[in-house]
Image: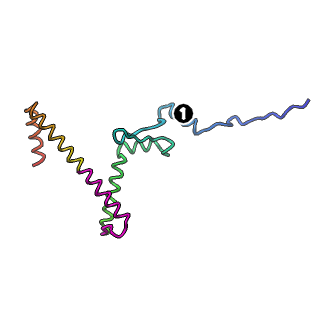
Amino acid sequence: MSSAPVSRAWPWAGFDPATWMASWWRGLGLAPESLTQPILPGWAITINGINSSAPQTEVEVLQHHSYGRQLGRMADALQALIEERGEDGSSDPRVREFLAMKREIDDIKLDAAAGRVDRVRADLAALKAARPAEYRRLRDALREVLD
């Protein structure tokens, strides 16, 4: 009677250490499966192991500096470097396009600031009508700051 050779597979065959580690970390609550940062109403960015090599680190950075803040600071720095070189952007279309985009973004920010001031004015008018004492207190506090 002949016996077939016995296969002695390595006990870890088919074992995926990365999957095991990920489930272990999630099981301890150390690494969420996916993280989401709202950007605008209806918009969100999902940060996970598929689109980030270090999702937890990225989330920690975003808690201090949003993508918009990061991009804004880079745009400001690039504009400063362009101005330092004395370029007006006319020689390079990439520089012209960047400076045009930067001007548009700055205009959008100023328009948003004006809108916020208009909302404050409307709120103050409502306070003046409904709570005159509170209105006077806030008016006086604003005058101190504005003068």
What secondary structure is marked by label 1?
A: helix
Image x and y of residue 57, in percent: 44, 44
Asked if residue 100 is positioned above or below residue 86 in the image, the reply reads above
The secondary structure making up most of the magenta span is helix
Residue 41 falls in which quadrant of the image? Answer: top left
Q: Residue at x 67, y 36 (%)?
A: 12
Image x and y of residue 8, in percent: 76, 35
Point out the image quarter for the N terminus.
Answer: top right
Q: Total number of numbered labels? A: 1
Of residues 47 and 55, the one drawn nearer to the viewer in this rendering: 47
146 left or right, relative to 85 = left
Magenta residues, start to end: 86-110
The kind of residue on which mark 1 rests is: Trp
Image x and y of residue 117, in percent: 18, 44
Q: Residue at x 35, y 64 (%)?
A: 95
Of residues 100 and 128, the one drawn nearer to the viewer in this rendering: 100
65 left or right, relative to 128 = right
Image x and y of residue 114, in percent: 20, 47
74 left or right, relative to 123 = right
Farthest right residue?
1
Residue 74 is inside the magenta segment: no
Residue 98 is inside the magenta segment: yes
Q: Which residue is mark 1?
A: 24
Asked if residue 133 is positioned above or below residue 140 in the image, the reply reads above
103 left or right, relative to 143 = right
